[in-house]
Image (cartoon, rainbow, N blue to C red):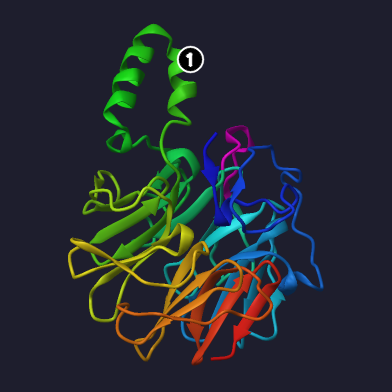
Amino acid sequence: MRFVFSRLTLPVLFCSLIQISVFFSIPSLAENIPSVEARLASKSLLLDITKVGINKLVAVGERGHILLSSNAVDWQQANVPLQTTLTSVFFINNELGWAVGHDATILNTKDGGLTWQIQQNKPELEKPLLDIVFKNSTEGLAIGAYGLSFRTTDGGVTWENEFHSEFLLPEDAEYLKELKQEDEEAYLDEASSILPHFNRIVIDGRTLYMVGEIGLIAKSNDFGRNWLPFDEIYQGSFFDISRTMQGNLVVVGLRGHVFRSLKNGTPWQQRETETTALLNDIVLSDDERIFILGNNGTLLESVDDGQNYRLRIQKDGKALVAGVWFNNQLVVVSDVGVKIINL
């Protein structure tokens, strides 16, 4: 059984949230039951947050919670048609956005996040989607566990499943080829779990970058139809990748691993972090600082474009899952909801 980390952690199954955990695929416990308005939703497990325009934040998390705020303090709960755990949220403009989560769920909003509609929900897959990106209002890509990948060219009216054989090991590719000839049903079952987990996808101009399990770093110049894996630099999982203000790449993952690359992705240089915590997310500030968020209250800060980091452990020790730079503040989501970190 593969290990899945960070956003895949389902709170009712694990006694330690956002820690390294075995992921058990189970059907949603609350399929197609609308998310319930909860007074303390902003203090519950939240797994992603994004800035919409310059004056709005949208966060997503457990029980189908989607929250909106204009000041990072007061939060309004959106109207969501299901209670599935949501793992990531993305907006293409001030009104049009998508969220993804467990059961290969994809939700869409056309009013800036106030109300959401189901575009896809597949509890029979028993797999979570972990990230989603659109390059315009019609073309989008959602990725997740075990190489899960869905594409739309009509704004999410329809989503087509894709299988990316370029991420197969040579021996796995040969095995699947032989299995397909012998047993089609066994082939389909095996193909559905043989690829690594795709954890994060980032759009960078005309290029897409994706990171995931088993040291996966890849790029695509045709919006994910074909991927070029980078040479392996680390065998552990990666959870985020970002281009810095100066045009370099930073990738983060398990056991405090941070790698930096000048301009084009090679060569990668490992950076010292003084931590072995799982690192979840990269946040860039307006003043060219880089913040890396991790488990156990781990916060790394760089003022030299990611060459060196200062370790700033948060006293409560809570996992910092995702964050944004908003109104000159670092706003993060965690297993205790929204936090504004005093810098």
Q: Residue at x 37, y 47 (%)?
A: 235
- Find disc 1 in the rendering and name its residue: 185
Q: Is residue 168 above or below residue 207?
A: above
Q: In this view, does 307 lie above or below 121?
A: below
Residue 173 in percent (x, y) is at 30, 25
Q: In this view, does 238 lie to the left or right of 71?
A: left
User: Which quadrant of the figure has residue 304?
Assistant: bottom left
User: Which quadrant of the figure has residue 174?
Assistant: top left
Q: Is residue 55 left or right of residue 319?
A: left
Q: Which residue is drawn at 23% across and 49% down?
A: 231
For this orientation, the residue located farthest to the right is 39
Instruction: Identify the amino acid type marked 1.
Output: Glu
Q: In this view, does 10 lie to the left or right of 212?
A: right
Q: Is residue 63 visible?
A: yes
Q: Give the range drawn in magenta.
A: 119-127
Q: Is residue 97 visible?
A: no
Residue 43 in percent (x, y) is at 74, 73
Q: Which residue is drawn at 61% across and 85% down?
A: 340
Q: Is residue 103 above or below residue 205?
A: above
Q: Between residue 326 and residue 137, name the one nearer to us.
A: 326
Q: Residue at x 24, y 60 (%)?
A: 207
- What quarter of the picture does the N terminus occupy? top right
Residue 20 in percent (x, y) is at 58, 52
SS at badge 1: helix
